[in-house]
Image (cartoon, rainbow, N blue to C red):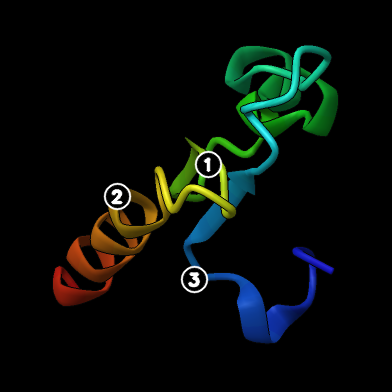
Amino acid sequence: VLIEDELKDAVLLVFANKQDLPNAMGVSELTDKLGLHSLRSRTWHVQATCATQGTGLYEGLDWLSNELSKR
């Protein structure tokens, strides 16, 4: 999906949800599994979240808002 021409300048925000669960994949492991370090020409961020508790959601959206305001 990210190779589509329409998305070449899009920033990427990944919510790593369910961080309240003991077997949840951490941010660094998720980053590795998704191969995000290979996206050298793209701005991306992985935000740890727990949607049921509301943690991390606003932080991720704040990051996205800040990135979009730079454009």
State which quarter of the image contains the N terminus. Answer: bottom right
* Distance Cα–Cα, label 2 vs label 1: 9 Å
Callout 2–callout 1 Cβ contact below 8 Å: no
The residue drawn where x is 66% and y is 86% is 6
The residue drawn where x is 58% and y is 53% is 52
Residue under pointer 1: 49
Callout 3–callout 1 Cβ contact below 8 Å: no
The residue drawn where x is 84% and y is 23% is 33
Residue under pointer 2: 59
Give amino acid for label 1: Thr
Disc nearer the start of the sequence (2/1): 1
Residue under pointer 3: 9
Report x, y in % for residue 41: 51, 46
Quarter occupied by residue 65: bottom left
Report x, y in % for residue 50: 56, 42
Disc nearer the start of the sequence (2/3): 3
Report x, y in % for residue 66: 18, 63
Give amino acid for label 2: Glu
In the image, residue 63 above or below residue 47: below
Instruction: State the mark number for residue 33.
Output: none
